[in-house]
């Protein structure tokens, strides 16, 4: 079978000339793999963080004392471990930001990342609140759902922005970014090595 025959006769002639479906299948698989869209680095990280663990991820400002206090509270109020955490400044955090159309260095808002999408500002707070259970007889999901529908988003976000814009003056900043819980709650903080060298 000549190269000119391949290029001029098309795939159907190629199949009939070689007389074997196995080779054709291999060629088709190769062509499909070379034409399949390649996931960008951020999207690849997004796939990896949810590949074996579907728990949502809270992206928080790792140097903000107020934010870190909120993370500690969420850990206490989530005894079943339904939530995971990563600093916005981490490699994982930056890739997840980019995968959802945000700048890698944007630390202006907490981000609640789920397998279905990402939420910011007050929507993120409400999404997180729905997963918390401070007391067995006091689930916060109904309150969070009510707040989402009863309070307009523009008003909720205005309150959020007021706190977020002043978070460093309220409780100050840490000297180093928090990437884990210092050995405690290891399974609750996303391993930054998932992002590889990206």
Image (cartoon, rainbow, N blue to C red):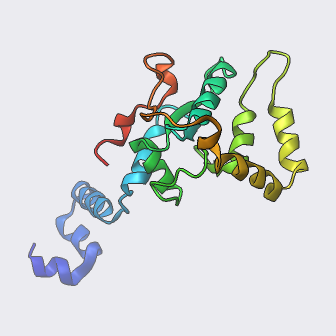
Q: Which of 25 and 172 is in front in this view?
A: 172
Q: Is residue 50 visible?
A: no
Q: Nearer the viewer, residue 49 or 111?
A: 111
x 20%, y 84%: residue? 8
x 32%, y 66%: residue? 35
The image shows residue 31 at horizontal and vertical percentages of: 28, 64
Q: Is residue 178 visible?
A: yes
* Residue furthest to the right: 150
x 41%, y 31%: residue? 191
Residue 146 appears left or right of 177: right
* Residue furthest to the front: 169
166 in relation to 62, above or below: below
The image shows residue 131 at horizontal and vertical percentages of: 71, 31
The image shows residue 170 at horizontal and vertical percentages of: 65, 39
x 66%, y 24%: residue? 73
Q: In which quarter of the image is the N terminus?
A: bottom left
The image shows residue 144 at horizontal and vertical percentages of: 82, 38
Residue 121 appears left or right of 147: left
145 in relation to 53, above or below: below
Give the total number of marks visible in the rendering: 0
Q: Which of 96 and 162 is in front in this view?
A: 162
Residue 162 appears left or right of 148: left
């Amino acid at each position: 079978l000549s190269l000119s025959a391949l290029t001029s006769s098309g795939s159907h002639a190629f199949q009939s000339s070689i007389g074997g479906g196995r080779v054709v299948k291999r060629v088709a698989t190769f062509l499909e793999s070379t034409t399949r869209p390649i996931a960008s680095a951020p999207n690849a990280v997004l796939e990896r963080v949810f590949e074996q663990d579907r728990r949502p991820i809270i992206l928080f400002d790792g140097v903000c004392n107020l934010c870190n206090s909120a993370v500690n509270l969420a850990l206490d109020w989530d005894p079943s471990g339904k939530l995971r955490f990563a600093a916005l400044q981490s490699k994982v955090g930056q890739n997840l930001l980019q995968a959802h159309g945000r700048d890698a260095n944007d630390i202006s808002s907490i981000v609640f990342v789920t397998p279905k999408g990402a939420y910011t500002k007050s929507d993120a707070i409400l999404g997180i609140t729905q997963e918390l259970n401070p007391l067995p007889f006091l689930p916060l999901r109904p309150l969070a759902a009510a707040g989402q529908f009863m309070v307009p988003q523009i008003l909720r976000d205005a309150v959020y922005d007021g706190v977020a814009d002043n978070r460093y003056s309220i409780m100050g900043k840490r000297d180093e970014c928090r990437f884990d819980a210092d050995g405690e709650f290891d399974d609750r903080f996303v391993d930054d090595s998932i992002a590889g060298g990206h």
